[in-house]
Amino acid sequence: MLKIATTLFTMLAVLSVTITAPVHGQPPVKSGPNAAVAHNEPAPKADKKRPDLKKAFEEETKKFKAKSAEFDPVKLELEKSRQQAKKGWSKRDTAFMVVFAVGIAVLVVLLVKYGKNCIETTPPNCNIGTDDNCYCERYEEDDKARGVRLP
């Protein structure tokens, strides 16, 4: 049983490490002879004129006002159906819940098996923690419930 529990805990650890999202650090710094100069250079000046943002926003506002002036229930339903949240769990959430449930099940099995003090084992004088064929026949709580005194 201990071998199985160790195997399950190892599988739980491997799954929990591989399922988590990778973490990305900062982008690499430029290397080479001009690396130090690249950070201190001013930004290159653009010869072209920049677009007028105020004008661009006015055009977009006009487009949205024109769209909102017309009311089409069919288009409204299509947009609502596109914007609705995805129902159900993602694969990552499902995998996390499966790993969590397996971990809890293993913990419960270990607590049930090792949580009580064993008085009598089969075969006699075996160790429950290390022997796979060792079973407890009588627990301490059972004797307390019956009113039997221990020797």
Image (cartoon, rainbow, N blue to C red):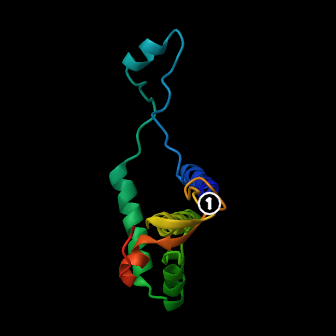
Which quarter of the rendering shows the C terminus? bottom left
How crowded is the residue under tag 1: few (<14 C-alpha within 10 Å), some, or many (20+)? some
Picture residue at 46% right of the left edge, 71% below the top: 139
Quarter-wise, where is residue 12 in the image?
bottom right
The residue where tag 1 is placed is 1
Q: Nearer the viewer, residue 16 or 55?
A: 16
Quarter-wise, where is residue 44 in the image?
top left
Position in image of residue 20 (x %, y %): 53, 52
Q: Is residue 92 left or right of residue 49?
A: right
Picture residue at 44% right of the left edge, 17% below the top: 38
Q: Nearer the viewer, residue 81 or 131?
A: 131
Q: Could you say whether the residue bearing mark 1 is in a helix, strand or loop?
A: loop
Q: Is residue 102 visible?
A: yes
On screen, 151 above or below 10?
below
Picture residue at 49% right of the left edge, 88% below the top: 72
How many marks the image carries: the answer is 1
On screen, 50 above or below 27?
below
Picture residue at 51% right of the left edge, 87% below the top: 77
Position in image of residue 111 (x %, y %): 46, 66
Going by the picture, which residue comes out furthest to the bottom?
A: 73
Q: Amino acid at mark 1?
A: Met
Which quarter of the rendering shows the N terminus? bottom right
Quarter-wise, where is residue 16 in the image?
bottom right
Q: Nearer the viewer, residue 87 or 82?
A: 87
Going by the picture, which residue comes out furthest to the front?
A: 151
